[in-house]
Image: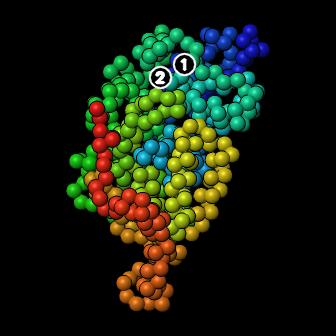
Amino acid sequence: MTERGIKKVVLAYSGGLDTSVIVPWLKENYDNCEVICFTADLGQEEELDGLEEKALASGASKLIIRDLREEFLTDYVFPTLQAGAIYEREYLLGTSIARPLIAKHMVEIAETENADAIAHGCTGKGNDQVRFELTAMALNPKLKTIAPWREWDIRSREDAIRYAKRYQIPIAQTEKDIYSRDRNIFHLSHEGGLLEDPWNEPEKEMFQLSVGPEEAPDDPEYLEIGFERGIPVSLNGETLSALEFFIRLNKIAGAHGIGRVDIVENRLVGMKSRGVYETPAGTVLIKAHQALESICMDKHTMHYKDFVAVKYAELVYNGMWFMQLRQAMDAFVQVTQQRVTGDVRLKLYKGNIIIAGRKSPYSLYREDYASFGEEDVYNQQDAQGFIQLFGLPLKVEALLSIEGTGKTGYQTPDYSQFKRD
């Protein structure tokens, strides 16, 4: 063991600015410990090019790359979509659901390689540090976690660039292109740079997965998505693997300007941050899934599921993927999805997703039941008793008001007590 008790570290390695400088920093500050870099292939595509050469040149003993795209989609993306989990009304959790998967494999590699610690390049201000470390705590709390951003003297990305230059580490970022990005098969996030001022409009050149709606085709495109138990399985009648499904749908939706979100969100640590996200396929799927649920799910289950979805999103955003409550809620969600099977037809047009049709063998919608004609299922005369019972609390409150004050409810209320002085 070294003087600081660390002889081998598994580093979550992206090849970006932060993790590039962490390799030499770990060796410099932890008595020349061995650094094993781990990269999860989640669909970064060209970002993976040349990573091994770069990691070794930075001082790592080796780079381990695992293709986790299918696992990411089937075990993390799909359950989140089935739950309808959306953080603060708009964020589809593209980064949040990737971190526990990466951390899970880091722990596995650390155990296989007999490492003493894992390390990550998350800042001390963000959410990702929590997501990585809570996962490690849930799976193997005996592993030490090293978070350089909470230890070193580097205070900005400009400082990190200078550190990288000192060690002659090639980096993609420059002082002019200072965005922090996270990309996977599900989404691409952008933070930093001019986005730090929420008044600034994102620049056109920043986007990579989608065109602007004004640049999208003038003709709409129709899609048909087939679901089985809440999971997308076919696109335009062709059964596809999860990976191929997302590859195709991302291209189609991105070409029509679908999936851009610009939000100021509340981080777990208490501060607000601005992020711009591109989630083309995911945005289409959440819309289609909601449309199918609308005909397959009964009222009470749907309303309660909407409540669960908010809590589900909060837990995932806060890094609690392996918490028992999230797993229990997922069990509930899976029950709700047993009959969410069918097809949804959508029209994509200049950033808009328009539901053009939906059908299911389990549909609870019946035209003959919903019509105003006479039938055997519903007797309109029954409505009178229902309304009397449903409105009974309102009736009692009004009667008491009349008895006590002589006033009826239609009189204009006085809001003067709420006016500012």
* Left or right side of 146 for 367: left
Q: Amino acid at mark 2?
A: Leu
Check disc 1: other Cα within 10 Å, few if <14, some if 14-19, many if 20+.
Answer: some
Q: Nearer the viewer, residue 187 or 43?
A: 187
The tag earlier along the polypeptide, 2 or 1, is 2
Quadrant including the N terminus: top right
Report whether residue 254 is seen: yes
Residue type marked 1: Trp
Quadrant where the image shows the C terminus: top left
Whether 400 is drawn above or below 166: the answer is: below
Whole-percent x, y for residue 42 in the image: 53, 41
Q: Looking at the image, which residue is at 63% across and 47% down?
A: 326
Find numbered disc 2 in the image and state the secondary structure of the residue it sits on: helix
Label 2: how many Cα within 10 Å (few below 14, some 14–19, many 20+):
many
Identified at 43% across, 30% down, the residue is 272
Which dot marks residue 17? Answer: 2
Mark closer to the observer (2, 1): 1
The way the protein has been coloured in the rendering is rainbow
Find residue 360 and report its horizontal and vertical position in percent.
49, 73
Residue 179, horizontal then vertical, whole percent? 39, 27
Residue position marked by numbered label 1 in the rendering: 149
Image quadrant of residue 159? top left
